[in-house]
Amino acid sequence: MCKRRSARANWARRGLDALVSESTFPYMETQAPPLNTGDVRLAERLRILRRGRGWSLDELSALSGVSRASLSRIENAEVSPTASVLGRLAGAHRTTVSRLLAEIEGDAPALVRRAEQAEWIDPATGFRRRSVSPPSLDFDCELLRCEMPAGARIDYPLPPRPGLEHHLYLIEGALELTIEGAVHHLRAGDCLRYKLTGASRFVATGRRPARYILVLR
C-alpha cells in the first residue's frame, strides 16, 4: 500500500512539474530554429561594418546602448535584430537603417521594379519596411513604404544621423509620432515634416494598420 501511494505521489509531482514548466516557459524550444538567409547576410554586413570602423563589440555597445551579448548573437545570426535595435545601430554608425541593411552601390538604375524593392520585417512587432527607392551614391533621398500593425509601437532612442530630414505621408490608419518630446497625431492624408536630432517614437493608434510613405534626405 505504501509503495502504491509513493508511486502515485511521484507521478503527481511529475505531472505538476510539467504543468508548471509549460505555463512558465510556454515558448521554450529544445532546438534552435533554422537560420534565415536574410538574417545571415545582415549579420555578416553588421560584423563587416563594425570591424571596418575598428570597433570592438564593447565599443559598439557603448555607442549604441545595445548589450555586448545581444550584438554578438546578432552578428552570429542567432537572433534577428528588431527595428529599435537597428535604429540604435544606425545611430551609432551615423547612417540610415536602409544603408545599414544593404550595400550601397553607385550607378543605381533609374527604374526600380517592385520585385527589386527589398522588404524587411521587424520580428518583434511585425512592422514592414519596403525600400521603394533604395539608397545610392548617386542620389540624396530614400523613399520607403512602411506598415505598422494596429497597436504596434517602436522607439528609436537615437537619430540615424543628426539633422536627417523626414517627410512622412500617412496613407491609411492613424499614427502617433513623438519627435523629441513633441507629440503629433496623424490621420490618413496628413503629412509631417521634421529634422531629427534626438529620440522618436512611432505608435499605430488606429484599429487598422498604419501605412505610410517616408522620404529621408
Image (cartoon, grey):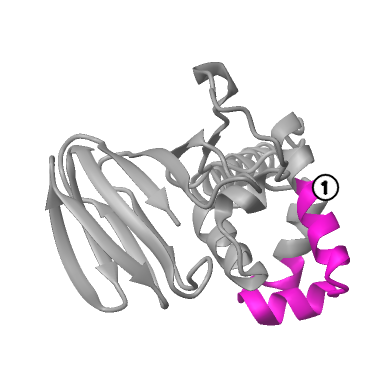
x 44%, y 73%: residue:
163
In percent of width and height, residue 147 lies at 35, 37
For the residue marked with disc 1, what is the amino acid? Glu
In percent of width and height, residue 128 lies at 44, 37
Residue 33 vertical placement versus 43 (above, below): above
Q: Quadrant of residue 86?
A: bottom right
Q: In the image shown, does 126 or 106 lie closer to the viewer?
A: 106
Residue 35 located within the stretch drawn in magenta = no
Q: In the image shown, does 89 or 27 lie closer to the viewer?
A: 89
The residue that disc 1 covers is: 44
Q: Quadrant of residue 103?
A: top right
x 38%, y 39%: residue:
146
Task: State whether the magenta stretch is mostly helix, strand or loop.
Answer: helix
x 31%, y 39%: residue:
149
**What is the quadrant of the C terminus in the image?**
bottom left
x 21%, y 75%: residue:
182
**What is the quadrant of the N terminus in the image?**
top right
Residue 101 vertical placement versus 46 (above, below): above
Q: In the image shown, does 11 or 156 lie closer to the viewer?
A: 156
In the picture, measured across the screen, residue 195 lies left or right of residue 15, that is: left
Q: Which residues are magenta?
A: 43-69
**Circle 1 Cα neighbour tier, 10 Å, few/some/many (<14 / 14–19 / ≥20):** some
Q: Is residue 127 visible to the viewer in this orientation of the structure?
A: no
In percent of width and height, residue 93 lies at 67, 68
In the picture, measured across the screen, residue 94 lies left or right of residue 202, that is: right
Residue 59 located within the stretch drawn in magenta = yes
Q: Is residue 159 visible to the viewer in this orientation of the structure?
A: yes
